Image: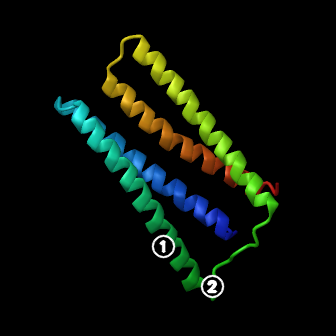
Amino acid sequence: MKPSSQEATILASMGGALGGLLGYCAVMAAYYHSGQLTDARIGMSTLGLMIVCVLLSFSLRWLLHKAFAITEPWFPCTVLDERDKLIELKGMQASYATFAIGFVITMALLWSGAESTLGFALIAISLVVGELVSGCVRLYQYRSGY
């Protein structure tokens, strides 16, 4: 079953977030194992994470659009209605809840004496995981016929 235009956008966003998160984790692991994990490198890597996520999301969206244009004479676009706004709000709620849980866990770790570099990385990761959870909730809502 081909995804609708809304589902294709969600998949592209989730793919960009997942690709950025995997790259971020690989870079952080490399810095940690080489003993070069500093505040400056964490900040630079987090900025890179955000830029890579946005670039991957746009490029995946473009690739999906081109793939549908090659196989079909038109991109399957569905009409937007109130249901789409409700699904978007449910996704935002899930994203905010995921980020809030990650933020509280990070603050508890910092309160218990963990390093600030770990806290900064966990906050960035919880933002990206929130985007992935939001995408899953929205895809579930679209596929379940809400």
Asked whether disc 2 touches disc 1, contact meaning CB atoms under 8 Å apart, the reply is no
Q: Residue at x 44, y 33 (%)?
A: 123
Residue 32 in the image: above or below residue 143:
above
- Camera-side residue of 17 and 83: 83
Q: As drawn, is 9 to the left or to the right of 44?
A: right
| Residue 114 occupies quadrant | top left
Q: Secondary structure at mark 2?
A: loop
Q: Residue at x 79, y 65 (%)?
A: 81
- Camera-side residue of 96 and 30: 96
Measuring from the top left, give residue 108's x and y in whole percent: 48, 16
Graded by Cα atoms within 10 Å as few (under 14), some (14 to 19) or many (20 or more), the crowding at tag 2 reads few
**What residue is shown with label 2?**
72
The dot on residue 36 is: none
Report the amino acid beneath label 1.
Answer: Leu
Q: Residue at x 41, y 45 (%)?
A: 21
Viewport quadrant of the N terminus: bottom right
Q: How is the image coloured?
A: rainbow
Report the amino acid beneath label 2.
Answer: Glu
Viewport quadrant of the C terminus: bottom right
Mark 2 or mark 1, earlier in chain: 1
Residue 130 in the image: above or below residue 141:
above
- Camera-side residue of 104 and 20: 104
Q: As drawn, is 64 to the left or to the right of 91?
A: left
Measuring from the top left, give residue 135's x and y in whole percent: 61, 51
| Residue 116 occupies quadrant | top left
Q: Spatial distance from mark 2 to mark 1, Cα to Cα?
A: 14 Å
Q: Secondary structure at mark 1?
A: helix
Residue 61 in the image: above or below residue 105:
below
**What residue is shown with label 1?**
63
